[in-house]
Image (cartoon, rainbow, N blue to C red):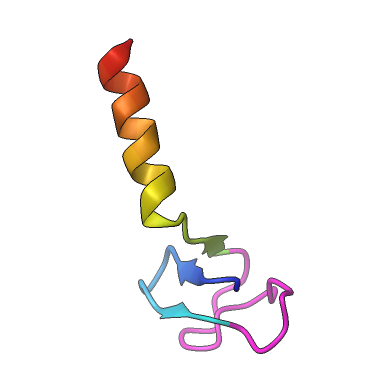
Amino acid sequence: MLSLHCKECNYKFTPKKDVIPKTCPFCGKEGTLEKVKPMQKIIDEVIDEMDS
């Protein structure tokens, strides 16, 4: 399941299709959407940084 986040207005949503739209459905800004990382991936990245 794809989760998206708008960098402009912080709107988080899951699109009906696994396609990233060009504009945010809440604020209408173009090019501001990014995939939300799963929490486990964030934890793994932090652990990797601590080990370095």
Q: Which region of the structure is painted magenta?
A: 15-31
Give coordinates of residue 45: x percent, y percent: 39, 33
Work out which residue is located at the far top of the displayed protein and give it.
Answer: 52
Of residue 15 and residue 39, the one placed in the foreground of this image is 39
Nearest the viewer among 36 and 31 is 36
Residue at 55% of width from left, 60% of height from top? 34
With 50 as the anchor, is 23 left or right in this view? Answer: right
Residue at the location (32% across, 41% down)? 43
**Residue 25 shown in magenta:** yes
The residue at 74%/74% (across/down) is 19
Give the percent coordinates (x, y) of residue 48.
36, 23
Is 28 situated left or right of 50 in this image? right
Is residue 39 in the magenta section? Answer: no
Q: Nearer the viewer, residue 21 or 28?
A: 21
Dividing the picture into quarters, in which one does residue 10 lie? bottom left
Q: Is residue 44 above or below residue 21?
A: above
The image shows residue 26 at horizontal and vertical percentages of 47, 88
Q: Quadrant of the C terminus?
A: top left
Q: Main secondary structure of the magenta part?
A: loop
Q: Quadrant of the N terminus?
A: bottom right
Image coords of residue 8 (percent x, y): 41, 67
Count of residue discs: 0
